[in-house]
Image: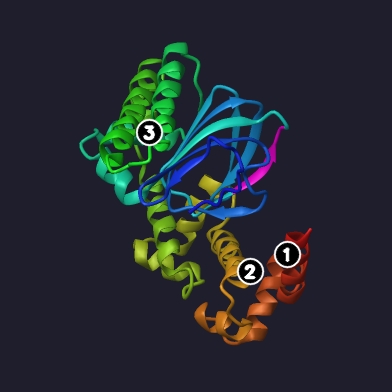
Amino acid sequence: MMQHNSHNDTEQRDFNNFGYFDIGPDDIPSGQAESNSFIVMLCTGGEGDFEVNMANVHLEAGTRLILGHALYIKNVRLSPDFKAMMMIINNPFAFDTLTGIPTEKLSLIAENPAVKVENRDEWQILVNLMDNVRLYARHPDRSAAREIVGGNFRMMICVIAEYEHSSGQEAGKASYTMADVYFKKFIDLLEEHIKTEHEVAFYAMKLNITPKYLSEITKQKTNHKAKEVISHILSIKLKREMLYSGKSMKVIAYDYNFADQSSLGKFFRKMNGISPSTFKKQQGAASLG
């Protein structure tokens, strides 16, 4: 789940099913944050740049962001006046809510995760629906979350698909190619196997394609080859283990299928330019500061 450090009085959260946040430039960590949920964000002021699964995403006032699956999100830059409304919905809840919506509508949004909303009616409807979630999140009894939050989320998806499809998005552009299918499956496989499998050949075999073709797909989607994507995600996972798991480096090396602690250290230095021990010291100093 994406971490959030806001002290905003309006912030409400219920991570059993969903979370709602009013966020500013100080509310999103500058490092990578893991996410295994749907994220809906409406940028209401300023601008910001994010990195999602090694792809760049730019937001400015009037932009909506819908992410159906992200292994990680990184805050690259937020302007001092950045403001946004954000809702996080866990995957099972979101998938249940979206059942029955035509695939072509969902694929349109998947192909265009961040869009500047030009139609005033569409933007106002989205803000109103997000406001509904905000108001409900304040209620002490959130037992009707599936009906209320799920209903508003479903309406957001339908509104986005209807307005943006009718305003010039071509149907052909909205449909998945096989490269899109393979890339999504690759991301899913990474989440499942990254601890033990670090080679492109394994994921290509699982997808029943060649390693070369998998690298061509990831290069097209992220501007990085498949091996670079694997190493990047693995490095993020290792950082999290080092900071939060309390495990020794020897145990982490074993858990992540490195030959030994030295092999893990060599990989980490190659990816980050510093040793694991230096990284932990720097992060500890930053936390104390």
At label 1, the amino acid type is Gln
Which scheme is used to colour this image of the protein?
rainbow
Q: Which residues are magenta?
A: 74-79
Q: CA distance from mark 3 to mark 1?
A: 37 Å
Specify the amino acid type for callout 2. Leu
Return the x and y of residue 13 as percentages of the image width and height. Answer: 46, 45
- Report which residue position mark 2 lands on: 243
Residue 118, image x, y percentages: 50, 15
Q: Residues within 10 Å of mark 3 (few under 14, many from 20)?
A: some
Among the two numbered marks 2 and 3 on one chain, the one whose residue lies closer to the N terminus: 3
Label number found at residue 136:
3
Location of residue 93 in the rendering, given as x and y in whole percent from the top left corner = 30, 46
Q: Is residue 44 magenta?
A: no
> Of helix, strand and loop, which mostly describes the magenta segment?
strand
Report how far apart the C-alphas of labels 2 and 1 lie in the structure: 8 Å
Q: Are marks 2 and 1 in contact (CB under 8 Å)?
A: yes
**Which mark is first along the chain, 1 or 3?**
3
The quadrant of the image that shows the C terminus is: bottom right
Is label 3 in contact with label 1 (beta carbons under 8 Å)? no
